[in-house]
Amino acid sequence: MLPELKITQLRHFVWVAELKGFHLAAEKAHRTQPAISLSIKDLENKLGESLFEKRNTKTTKTELTPFGKSFLPKAKELIEHHDRIAQDMTLLAEHKTGHLRLASVPSIASRMLPEILSKFVENAPNLHISFFDDNAGAVLKMVENKQVDFGIASMWEADEHSDKTFTPIWEDQIGVVCRSDHPLADKSELHWKELRDHRLISNGTSRLLQETDAAPLLTSSQFYISNMISLIAMLEQGLGISTLPGFAFPQGNPNLRFIPLKEPDIVRQIGIIQMSNKSLTPAAESLIQFILDSTGKG
Amino acid sequence: MLPELKITQLRHFVWVAELKGFHLAAEKAHRTQPAISLSIKDLENKLGESLFEKRNTKTTKTELTPFGKSFLPKAKELIEHHDRIAQDMTLLAEHKTGHLRLASVPSIASRMLPEILSKFVENAPNLHISFFDDNAGAVLKMVENKQVDFGIASMWEADEHSDKTFTPIWEDQIGVVCRSDHPLADKSELHWKELRDHRLISNGTSRLLQETDAAPLLTSSQFYISNMISLIAMLEQGLGISTLPGFAFPQGNPNLRFIPLKEPDIVRQIGIIQMSNKSLTPAAESLIQFILDSTGKG
DNA sequence: TTTGACGATAAGGTTTTCTTATCACTATAT
DNA sequence: ATATAGTGATAAGAAAACCTTATCGTCAAA
């Protein structure tokens, strides 16, 4: 039966040995001298051998026995090993290190995450981040397959009571996008019926119009363009108009206008999607909290 | 401030993780299930993060959190490290391993030690032994210089109250050595005066006659031979007779006889010499005990 | 010889750890 | 659907481990 050595006990031993005295060791351990005496005695009993030369007699020096001498380096190594692990785990728990994987829908990825992430990593210099951007469906899949710790996307009712949890964060209003010189360009808001006479290009986000008053627009749509970059190019070309969530609109584009759709007022809820049963890594947990805080939802 | 993890606690964690359950782990730890629950809880508090998935709810499986998963291998390593050290030190304390150095006077070295050492090492397969044989003075020096853990030799009064401790073990009686065809060869015991008419070769052990009734023999001695092999050769040649302690007599030599000296009856005390203040390694301690036991002095 | 420093020891209090008893929950088998 | 057996959590008190105060004996230096 092997004895079970306590780290604290080993520390006491090392201190007594290195400071050459029980009193000094006691001070360092924030304990009284008898506590150290007993601790060492217990250690000696466990090991079955004296660590220090017969004390209380002849010699006043606190000196290691040969046995103690051979134990000293081993004890120090074990303590160092312990401290290294304690340090590692503490850093991990405090999300200063580790690996964080997330996926997001492109609009948030380009519009909100750059600032959030750059601020977040300031306090976590050793944190590795893997980031994926894709459409909402793909994000959802990556969460389900546990390829990512969590995802950022919108979630529609169908999946509401599933094994995933949705925490809404941003509200993204649908609007109409057209060229600056388009007849609708100067409106400050629009009714869906005003769009009927214009060529509507549908895209990946157009399904948001389904099940709303504006649904009829989709059936009459001649073009469908899935790729956002192509879509923008077409719109800039003046091929037609389209609907997009606000965050997906390339803000700062001088040639295009974004006009909120007021009737129907369609708002896309974008938020965090995670598995309900699986708990998150500290780093992931922490980033979510950070996002909530920096968006005022905390 | 780093938390101080206890080895026992880490064991509990590893067992719960590997046996996938608190009850099984409790059994293995010879503890009750609540004890393990609390132990894990305490560990989680120290680390500041959950190790197992939210228990008591939804899932009945005891599963690690990502944090716990990354902790598991580290915890196992630390436990193994601890056990390795505990093992090493226990072996060292039980003198199954280590390095043992001793010096002995040749008579004991050749007469008693072979059997003793071969029996001793049977129980200590990993013990390294360095052995030196030399005359009593040299043995004493090696003990003083700490070149050896202890020495085996005789010790004369002058050094009695020194920094060395002498533990007598063997009693070696002085006798007369002569060739088998020598006039004295058939005697069963001798008086020193019977030697006066024979040529006496003195040797390194002859000082044992000093301060005894037989001292006059030394002054009349014509030959002094320090080397034992040469001495034996001379004796076999019939050059003369000599005195030797019994253990120094090459037993089994067909050409020589050993006749105990009865008057004076000189007994050389041979025993263990060690430094008084310095404690011994477990291996040395153990060999000394073994010698005491096997000579009935324990 | 006295004093100061060292570590050991005794007695008693505090903290930690464990146990017994019980609860809440889930899954399986009636 | 209900009972049953299995999971882990929790509360209260007992046991063990740990620490403190007070004191002692020894040694070495003043």
Image: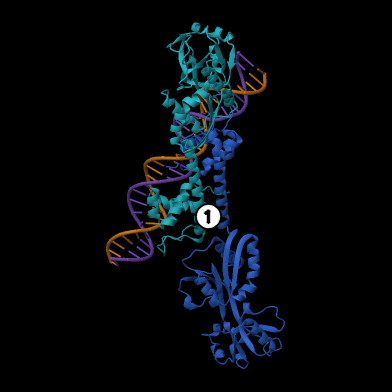
Chain colours: A cyan, B blue, C orange, D purple
User: Residue A204 location in percent, x, y?
Assistant: 56, 18
User: Residue A237 location in percent, x, y?
Assistant: 53, 18
Please determine whether, in this image, residue B127 is positioned above or below residue A174.
below
Q: Is residue A249 left or right of residue A1?
A: left
Q: Is residue B112 left or right of residue A10?
A: right
Q: Nearer the viewer, residue A54 or A254?
A: A254
| Observer able to see residue A198 | yes
Please determine whether, in this image, residue A251 is positioned above or below residue A17.
above
Q: Is residue B240 left or right of residue A10?
A: right
Q: Residue at x 43, y 32 (%)?
A: A119
Quadrant showing the C terminus of chain A = top left
Please determine whether, in this image, residue B69 is positioned above or below residue A195.
below
| Observer able to see residue B30 | no
Please determine whether, in this image, residue A72 is positioned above or below residue B23.
below
Dot 1 amino acid type: Gly
**Residue C25: quadrant of the picture:** top right
Q: Nearer the viewer, residue A287 or B237?
A: A287
Instruction: Indicate the secondary structure of the residue bearing disc 1.
Output: loop
Q: Which residue is mark 1?
A: A48
**Residue B174: quadrant of the picture:** bottom right
Q: Crowding at label 1, few (<14), some or many (≥20) Cα neighbours within 10 Å?
A: some
User: Residue B83 location in percent, x, y?
Assistant: 56, 48
User: Residue B293 location in percent, x, y?
Assistant: 59, 65
Q: Residue at x 46, y 71 (%)?
A: B163
